[in-house]
Each structure stands twice: as C-alpha cells, then as structure tokens.
Image (cartoon, rainbow, N blue to C red):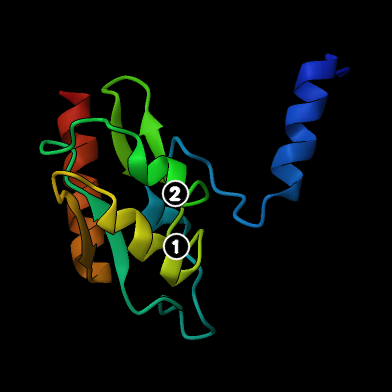
Amino acid sequence: GLLDPYEEQLSKVYEGLEASNDPSLPSHTQIELDEQGEPVLARFTYVDENTCIGCKNCALVARNTFLIEETLGKARVFSQGGDSDELIAEAIDSCPVNCIHYVSHEDLVTLETEREQRAEQ
C-alpha cells in the first residue's frame, strides 16, 4: 500500500529510533533480554499515574523513555532504558510531585499489569 507523505515521514522517524517500542503496549513486554531470558537492565522506571499531574517535564527531558498517555494526560514509561541513565535520572529529578520510581523487573510487571487491568474496567 502507498503511504501518504506524512505517514512516510513518520515511518522513517520510527525506523531511525533505536527503541522501536510500541507506545500502546506495556513497557515490560518489550524489554531487552539476555541469552538466559533475563532482563539486561538492572532497574526499571515506573510512573505512579495516580500521583502524576501531567506536567510533561519527564517527557521533555527523556523523550525516548517517557510519553504523555493521551487518554489520561499522565506520564508513562513506554521504553525502558530508552535514554541514558543520566537523562532518566534528570527526568526523575524534574518531576514536581516525585511520582517516578525505580522498580525491580518483578514489580514493573506487577504494576503495569495492574494498570492495564484498571484501564479495562
């Protein structure tokens, strides 16, 4: 099928992104695993969306990690490790309500699964 010029440009942008994550899927379903099937990253980032005020600071600082979820207008991690550790730390520090947390892989899976279940209700 033919893409219109805008879609064509978007697809080029997405191809160029190192993190080819689908923002509509929970980040824990798209993390990089080693040969043993264990997560490559030691820690993960999670936004407590109940506390988030949607200020957009984190998404402006670490654009390859955070986005503003359109339905709720709250920040969400769409790509674990999408930016450097320093940039993610800066994004966390930029949050006025301290709602971004480092979590273990196990907690990330639990938190994101619970979030998806709440969204379905």
Residue 93: image location, x then y, percent: 26, 58
1 or 2: tag closer to the N-terminus? 2
Q: Is residue 94 left or right of residue 82?
A: left
Which residue ends up furthest to the bottom in the rendered image?
A: 36
Secondary structure, mark 2, is helix
Residue occupying image coordinates x 46% and y 78%? 40
The quadrant the C terminus occupies is top left
Q: Looking at the picture, tell me which residue is in the foreground, 89 or 3.
A: 89
Residue occupying image coordinates x 41% and y 76%? 41
Secondary structure, mark 1, is helix
**Looking at the picture, does residue 21 appear above or below residue 88?**
above
Residue 45: image location, x then y, percent: 30, 60
**Looking at the picture, does residue 104 appear above or below residue 69?**
below
Residue occupying image coordinates x 77% and y 18%? 6
The quadrant the N terminus occupies is top right
Answer few, some or many: residues within 10 Å of disc 1's Cα (few below 14, many 20 plus, some between 14 and 19).
some
Q: Is residue 65 left or right of residue 103?
A: right
Residue 53: image location, x then y, percent: 18, 31
**Looking at the picture, does residue 3 appear above or below residue 112?**
above
Which residue ends up furthest to the top in the rendered image?
A: 4
Q: Which residue is mark 2?
A: 61
Q: Which residue is mark 1?
A: 87
Q: Looking at the picture, tell me which residue is in the foreground, 88 or 31.
A: 88
Which residue ends up furthest to the right in the rendered image?
A: 2
Q: Amino acid at mark 2?
A: Val
Q: Amino acid at mark 1?
A: Leu
Pointer 1 with pointer 2, Cβ within 8 A: yes
Q: Looking at the picture, tell me which residue is in the foreground, 93 or 27.
A: 93
Spatial CA span between label 1 and label 2:
7 Å
Image quarter for residue 39? bottom left
Image quarter for residue 48? top left
